[in-house]
Image (cartoon, rainbow, N blue to C red):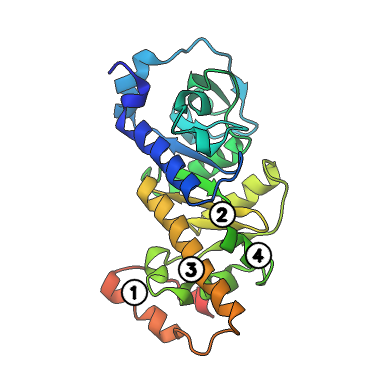
Amino acid sequence: MDNVLDLKVVKLFVDTCHQSWLKGWNERNGGNMSYRMKEEEVAQIRHLFDFSGEWRPIGLTVENLAGEFFTVTGSGKYYKNVLREPENNICIVQIDEKGENYKIVWGLCEGGVPTSEFPTHLLNHSIKKEKTNGAYRVIMHAHPANTIALTFLLPLEDKVFTREIWEMITECPIVFPAGIGVVPWMVCGSSDIAYATGEKIKQFDAVIWSHHGIFCCGQDFDVAFGLMDTIEKSAEILIKVMSCGGKKQFITREQILALAEPYNVPIDPGMLD
């Protein structure tokens, strides 16, 4: 392979950024995404990497990610430009053998660093890698408007958001049977939001950042993107229902739990208490 951009997974990364932009989730330089690359993917393009760059501190230690490679969006970069100039807006980074530092080995050709949320991404990649035996590889953060609006209207509690959003579309409990986590407002890019999200991500695949956006993860781009898309569509329906005077009927607790067996999903009854 003669070009990093010819690698299928890099194409998927670029396309997912573009689809997120088209959804209106990533205004200006808002949002970020990362992908933990597979060994066979790295092997196909490793000869195109530049390993001469400096190591930079992550700010935390992620031992189980040592030596791994990540494709990630750049800090201050606009999603609308990723499709047109991917080599200037995304990068591939390597984690050192202690899990304490990273270096850029491809991309950001006009300068720059990975997203300011990169430590948050890595901490949560580390947790999900352990929790899923390495299955989860994608983390994306964006600013879907309806979901953010709900953080000004609903109590900032996991069970409240889960129940309300589950009720709006029958498929929601099937798509995210564990529910949704919620964290209070925190400074973006801070260690506080990284660790708070990390605690929630142990239980959930989606965490709502109050007055800010959503943080989603999954096995691949379709799963992570689809999770965010489903939550945002349900949030839009809920906003419309609330705007029209509120619910006149709803999906009951028993009906939600009845979805578990036919679809073979572990819907958490505790989220309905």
Residue 49 locus on image (x, y percent): 42, 15
Mark 4 or mark 3, earlier in chain:
4
Q: CA distance from mark 2 to mark 3?
A: 13 Å
At mark 1, the secondary structure is helix
Q: Which residue is mark 2?
A: 214
Is 41 situated left or right of 56 in this image?
left
Question: In percent of the image, x 46 and y 28: which residue is there?
Answer: 86
Find residue 234 and name its label. 3
Mark 2 or mark 3, earlier in chain:
2
Q: Is residue 93 visible?
A: yes
Callout 2: few (<14), some (14-19), or many (20+) C-alpha neighbours within 10 Å?
A: many
At mark 4, the secondary structure is loop
Is 251 situated left or right of 103 in this image?
left
Which residue is at the far top?
A: 52
User: What residue type is disc 3 on?
Assistant: Ser
Mark 1 or mark 3, earlier in chain:
3
Q: Which residue is mark 1?
A: 260
- Who is closer to the viewer here, 56 or 216? 216
Tell me the mark number nearer the camera, choosing from 1 and 4: 4
Callout 4: few (<14), some (14-19), or many (20+) C-alpha neighbours within 10 Å?
A: many
Question: In percent of the image, x 43 and y 46: which residue is there?
Answer: 19
Residue 72 locus on image (x, y percent): 49, 33
**Res. 30 image quadrant:** top right
Q: CA distance from mark 4 to mark 3?
A: 14 Å
Q: Which residue is mark 4?
A: 151
Question: In percent of the image, x 48 and y 38: which residue is there?
Answer: 34
Mark 1 or mark 4, earlier in chain:
4
Find residue 163 and name its label. none
- Who is closer to the viewer here, 141 or 87? 87
Tell me the mark number nearer the camera, choosing from 2 and 3: 3
